Image: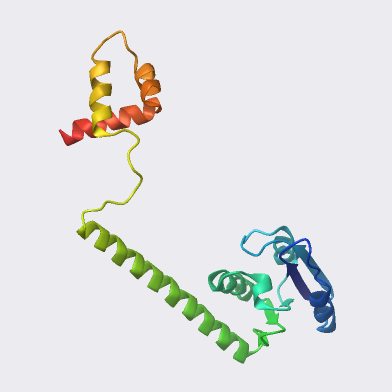
Amino acid sequence: MIIGYARVSTQDQTPEFQVDALEKAGCEQIFQEKFTGKFRERPELSQCLRTLRMGDVLIVWKLDRLARSLKDLVEIVQDLNDRDIGFKSLTESIDTTNSGGRLIFHIFGALAEFEHDLIRERTKAGLQAARARGRKGGRKPAMSDSDIRKAAAMLSDSQITKTEVAAHFGVTRTTLNASLKRMKLAA
């Protein structure tokens, strides 16, 4: 079975042009969606992918209608390939039902993996450079060192509860306890 998927990003747009092209390509069933592509989980796409069976072919008008990023596109098409489902993109003339199309898609996959590795390497280098300058990652502590000392002093009075001290500093008891523990470890 040949199944089509058409998507437009906003409610103002109409998918008729895509639907016409998919019908001309021989689609027997077409899933249509008005949904932004930045989210991987889209109701009609999910239904479309569940409908596909071994030997079927999924056709889209253009690659960006199926996925927003190369990584997502490669993952979706790899899943289709693993399930023996073909994939065609009309605009880019990609057809994984033949060897040339599969080769092109493997090249896309290699590029996506390469891009992912580059991002990871740049992130590591940036974190190392920040550490070398004395900066530490993560969120700023909710309580300053002086606030922790004041909280410890307040807790030395048996009439004051941890809940009251936490409320005074605008934090939860869990945050107060973690801050006090951090002060003990630093001492």
- In this rendering, the answer to whether 38 lies above or below 165 is below
Most foreground residue, 81 or 95: 95
Is residue 95 something that shows in the picture? yes
Q: Residue furthest left?
A: 187
Looking at the picture, does residue 145 appear above or below residue 118? above
Residue 1 visible to an observer of this rendering: no
x and y percentages locating residue 154 in the rendered image: 27, 17
The residue at the point 84 percent across, 83 percent down is 24
Q: Quadrant of the N terminus?
A: bottom right
Query: Is 114 in front, or is 187?
Result: 187
Task: Answer above or below: position of 181 versus 70.
Answer: above
Q: Nearer the viewer, residue 183 or 151?
A: 151
The single residue placed furthest to the bottom in the displayed view is 100
Image point (36%, 31%), residue name: 175
Residue 61: image x %, image y %?
A: 73, 78
Which residue is drawn at the image coordinates 35% and 64% (left, top)? 123
Q: 57 left or right of 131?
A: right
Q: Is residue 76 left or right of residue 140?
A: right
Q: Position of residue 66 (x, y in %)?
A: 67, 71
Which image quadrant: the C terminus? Answer: top left
The figure's colour scheme reads rainbow
Q: Residue at x 34, y 69 (%)?
A: 121
Asked where in the image residue 62 lies, by quadrant, the reply is bottom right
Q: In this image, 148 relative to 34: left or right?
A: left
Residues 136 and 19: in front is 136
Height in image: 129 above or below 70?
Answer: above
